Structures are given as C-alpha cells and as structure tokens.
Image (cartoon, rainbow, N blue to C red):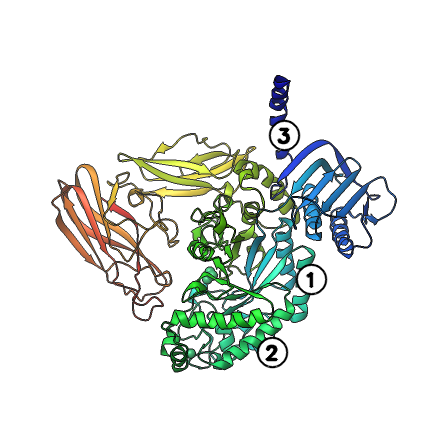
Amino acid sequence: MFLKKMTLLAVLFPLLLAAQNDIPIIPKPVSAIRKDGVFTLQPSTVIRYDMNSKELAAAAIFFQKHINTVSGFQLGVNKPSLSIITLKLGKFDEIGNEGYNLEVGATSITISANTKAGIVYGMQSIFQLLPSIRTNALLQIPCIQVKDFPRFGYRGMMLDVSRHFFGPEFVKEYIDLMASYKMNRFHWHLVDDPGWRIEIKKYPELTKTGAWRVDKTNKNWSDRQQAIPGEKATYGGYYTQEQIKDIVKYAAERNVTIIPEIEMPGHVASAVATFPYLSCNQIPQLPMTGGNYSNMSSNYCPGNDSVFTFIENVLSEVIQLFPSTYIHVGGDEVDKSSWKKCVRCQHRMKVEGLKTEEELQSYFVKRVEKFIISKKRKIIGWDEILEGGIAPEATIMSWRGEAGGIEAAKMDHDVVMTPGYPLYFDHYQAGPEGEPQAFGGMNTLKNVYDYEPIPKELNASQAKFVMGAQANLWTEMITTAEGIEYMVLPRMLALAEVVWSTKDSRNWNDFNVRLKNQFRGFEQRGIRYCKGNFKVNIVPVSQNGQLNVSLNTESINGEIHYTTDGSYPNAFSPLYTTPFPINKNTTVKAVTVIDRQSMSSPVEQTYAMHQAVGREVVYTNAFSKYYPANGPNSLTDGVRGTTSHGKYWHGFSGQDLIATIDLGKEASINKLTIGCLQNYKSWIFLPQQVKFEISNDGKNFTEAAVVPNNVSSSEGGEIIKDFIATLNGQKARYIRVTAKVIDGCPKGHPGEGHPGWLFADEIVVE
Ligand code: ACM
Ligand code: ZN
C-alpha cells in the first residue's frame, strides 16, 4: 500500500506541476488543476444565476459584454441549454470576500464565490483563457478546477493625471487593465502643482484656471520657461463631476475602488494660481508649465483659517463623488520655507504650541483628518505625514523606501507599500538607451516580480498592518496613453502576482511562460508594452587587472547572440556562453533570440581601454548603495557615463570621493582623468576640486596636480566634466584621487545647506 502510494505520487506530481504551467492565468491562482477535455463556448451557451440577485445580474451583463467583444455571441440568460455557465453566490470557506471557485467541465462552467467581486474575478480568469480579440478560432477553455483568493486586500495602481492630463476614456482603459489582473485600488492623483483635474462646483475657477497651462510640451519638463501674462493657456483638462461618477461606477463593476488624492498642504501651485489667498505670501501667480518652481508658491498657508474652509468645501464634494473609505491627502515633499517666513504660520505655531514646521504640517493633517473622520471616512497619506506626529487614524503610503511603512506598522497604523525601488513605474525598466525618457533609477520586470511587501523588520503581528502594495506612475515624462501602457506593461502583471498569489508560489520562470500569452494579447489588441525583460544586460566584470564582459537577460529560454566588430547582432551572430575578455577598445552589441527571432532592439556598450582598466578601486568612503553603477570597480571598467545618472555613476552623499588604485606594476603616466557629473535638480554637483597623487609603495604619495572646478554649482542642466592632470610620463604604481564634495547645496537651491551629491564615472589612466 505504502509503496503503491509513493509510486502514484511520483508519477502524478510532475504531471500536476506541468499541468499548472498549462494554465496561463496571471496572477497565478492559489490552486489550479488541469483536467481532461475542453469547454467550447458557443452561441447557444447560456448564463444561469438566481434572478433575485441584482449583483449576479450585473456580473452577467459584464460577462456578456466581454464575450460579445471576443466572439460576437450574445449569450442568453436562464434559458434551457446544453452549454451552461452558472454563477453562484453562497457561503464558501477559505476564499474570503474576493476569492472564487471555478470549475470548467466539458459542457458546463461554474463560478462560485461569497461576493460579486469573487464572481467577477472568476470571469477575469476565464477571459484570460480565451482569445483577447475576435478571431475565427474556436472559443475553447481547458477543463480546470480553480480555487483562488488574494494574499493582500490592497492591490493598487496610481496614475498621475496632473503632470499630464489623460481623458476619461483612457482612465477607463487603465482601470480595465488593472481589473484584468485583479488589481483593486485605483489611486487617482487628481491634484498637483501643474494641474487641478477635478471639477468642484463651489469653486468653478479651480478648473477654469488651475486645469490649464501654457503648452510647453516640446521642452524638457524641468527646463520649461514659466508662463508670462498674456500667453494663452491651452494645455490641460479636467474631469467633470458627471464623468467622475461614470468612472467610479465603471470601476465598481470591476471591483476597483477609486481612491482620490486631493494633495495638500504642498504640491498645490495649481490651487494657488486660482486663489492666491491660499498661499502664505498671497502673491498672484500663473499656472506652472512644468517643473520650474522658481518664485512659485506651492503650499497652502496653515496659519489661515480660510484655507481650511476652502479645503473642507472641496473635500465635501470629493466625498460625495467617491464612495471610497480612504481619501488620500498627499502630504509629500512640502518645502516648509514659506511657513518659516509667514507671520500667520508663525502665529499659529505659537498659539498651538508647535515647535517645528514639521509639527505645523502635523497640525494641518490632523485638522483635515478630523473633518474627514466626521464624514465617516479615513485619510491615507505619503510617509512624510509621520513627521511631526502622525494623525491618530492615518494610513501611511510608504514611498521613500519602506522605512515609513515599517515605522507606521510598529505604531499599529495601516500601511501600503509603494517604495520607489521597485514600485515607481515612471522609472526605467530597461536601457536607458533605446527606451523612452524616464526618471532615473531602474525598476526591471524581475525587480518588481521579486518584491516582497512584508519587510523582514516586522514581526507577524506588525506585518498584519501591511495592507498590500501599489505601483505609482508619475507622468512628468509621459504625455500619451501609449506611453502609459508602455510603462505599466508588463510590470503591473508582476506586481499583480506579488500582491495576489501566495508567496511560496512565486516562480520567475513559470511567470515568464504565462507572460507569453499576455504579450500575444497585447499585440492583438494594439496595446504597447515594454520588451525590456528581453534586453541584454552587458555587465563588465574584472579580475586581477583583466576586464571581462558578461551578458545576461531576465528572459528565460532566450539565447544571447552578440558582436564585438561593430556589426548588428542577430540570430546568426556568435552565441554567448561565458564571460569573454576585452583587451582593446570595443563596442559590444547583443540581442536575445528566441526561436531564431530577435526579441527586441539590440543593446550596445563601448569599452575604452586605459592602464587602470580591470584594476581594483579602494575607497576611503563607501559609495552610496543607491548608486552602485557596475559594482565596486565601476570607476575602472572602461565605461564612460551618460547624463542618465542612475546607471553609470558612483554617488557619494556629502562625502569626498577618495579612491586608490594599484596598477599592479610601475607604469609611465601621461595623463590622469576623473569624470564627474552635475545635475542641479537632482542635487548632484561637481567637486570643488580634484587632487591627483601618485606613489610607488602605496604609502607615501606625492601630489601630481590639484585641479579646481571652474563651473558654478548653480549651473542648471546636466554637465559632464573631466578633471584632468597632465603628468608627462611620470612613473608610479599607485594612484590616489581625492574629489572634494561641495560643502552643501548652494544658496537658492531647494536643498540649500543640505549635503549635496558627488558623482564619478571613471578614473582614466593614460
Ligand atoms: C512622491 O513620489 N512624491 C510621493
Ligand atoms: Zn502661512
């Protein structure tokens, strides 16, 4: 008996595993078993449900509409038929309030759940098994038995419609995409400096003025000139309350709750442009055209009671429109300098006994929370609302890493995790070469897939406060619907699996297999998506003075083919197997090939040889973990940086760069160079000066040159500057380079007096 059971398991188990792979549903269901046979959807198929249930009737209509789109069939309801889809609400164990059971047999399908949400999710799983557009193919669904329910209750996607405006039809598409993958919270960022996007009946001027700006879309976001009086404000838009009601209803049909964000007390230049009395200095200003903040007021004045009257009037209408328990009140990135100079604010602090401007912000948020609670709702805010004291019932959205979320959970406050790495979908997912311009940083598909929302720092009872996770899509760099699709797809699918599927079931290879089906669907429907996971990573690795190059791709089943002779790589170029040496100036080009087909455009990297290439760099102060470039020896890897500061540069915050390199033997040196970067708006500044020293024993160094910086730290834009020392063939084995960091961000900079960054890409020894 025992032996028989073992044998049976050994035979069955691999089959079951293979069977799971056959079911290409994302996010992966908790359990899904493939059975023999298929169900064929026909014009005669009917939907059957208890007619007394309004919810099931609504779900049936949702199902009928989708099936009509992909088949042209108009499925009947509650009629006799030999092909039946049954929807059943009841009391079912284990699956909770969003889960479902799905049984697909040869002539019948049953979806059962505790709620309409579960029924709709069962339908979404069926939709994923059908073609995504109308074709002549038979509409066949494999016979399966699925039990499925989410790991987290909060599965969010944020969309910023302030930086750029996206109309109601696209917002519905975004919600549709979310719902297909069982994401259930749409965080709608409706208010920010460059645009107020929600109609408020009591203040029609908010959208008459605050929703429109002078169109500078052809210029870089941060470098745009501000508007001047008389220029026509033609770019923008807003949602009417009727449109919002329609979108809220549309979302609810798909189990998506919309959380509106009415940003405060900062990021409200659009409101101030409409009503100057809302700011501290009360000086009139025009709507912003982009990210140029000079002389702009972007905060409410917490010293002025009329500001709170305004906010309460706005929120009263918002609460009427959105049934969501949560109202997002922003709270991020408040530059408090205007409050420091404002008599009303300072008076408020005195009267209320507030010691710091952080406490003034806390006062502000608590006062607004009191109002929102009086309307039976709750606030959620960015993690800055922890500073100066968290409001009593606030939920924290942790974006500056996970620290805010951890702190809040430890204080028994609910938390949504949305750390910049890896959940900011406005960051690059590949490249940056060949990718649409994005914010710095690199959040690849696999980075997202590997994300774990429960930080190790929390014990089991604290972990219960983590409600889930959310990806954020800020739109400074995104102006079109296709641009949004591209940044969200396929990363949202990885996040969906993180927040829905069991932690143990996550498997990157298996996800890749299921992803293929989705990619085909995107292509059929003309939806843009990023093939970044197919792009090749060209990574320098050095050992004992030898530079090697390793090639890898996140995609599984892909072969990498490459060239080093400048030619365009394809399936017939050499196949990559192991790291290969680079001994002369070389451009490596590589592409991932599956089934003899290149999966994306090639990636290329140029290596420029010099005497220090491949040598170890020893730092006195460690480089920031946020800017690791290509690892510890990135300054001797032969790779020069571009203005994309997230990729090629070692960063040092408020600390000098002191690097020592052992060339392995005495060398004759003509020239020493270190490349540095300035990017004013990212707080990165050229060093004050660079000192070059040489030595023969690694202990006693002599100064070869001190090169001053002749570029102002207030110079905007992105500047790459080489600091160069000429040595005329001096002999040395050791080089030491000391780049002196700026004393602090310069006068007039938003970070004035705070530590600035120093960035370097390469120490070139010639
Ligand atoms: C944020 O990214 N400022 C929340
Ligand atoms: Zn003030």
Say which amino acid is labelled 2: Pro
Looking at the rendered image, the disc whose residue lies closer to the viewer, 2 or 3, is 3
Quadrant location of the C terminus in the rendered image: top left
Distance (Cα) linking label 3 and label 1: 40 Å
Q: Residue furthest front?
A: 461
x and y, in percent, of residue 30 in the image:
61, 40
Say which amino acid is labelled 3: Leu
Q: Secondary structure at mark 1?
A: helix
Q: Which mark is residue 204?
A: 2
Q: Is residue 508 left or right of residue 127?
A: left
x and y, in percent, of residue 324 in the image:
62, 63
Q: Which mark is residue 249?
A: 1
Q: Secondary structure at mark 2?
A: loop
Mark 3, residue position: 16
Q: Which residue occupies 45% across, 82% down?
A: 282
Distance (Cα) linking label 2 and label 3: 60 Å
Q: Which residue occupies 42% across, 71% down?
A: 293
Badge 2 density bin: few <14, some 14–19, many ≥20, Cα 10 Å: few
Task: Examine the image and state in which quarter residue 756 appears.
Answer: bottom left
Ligand 2 position by quadrant: bottom left
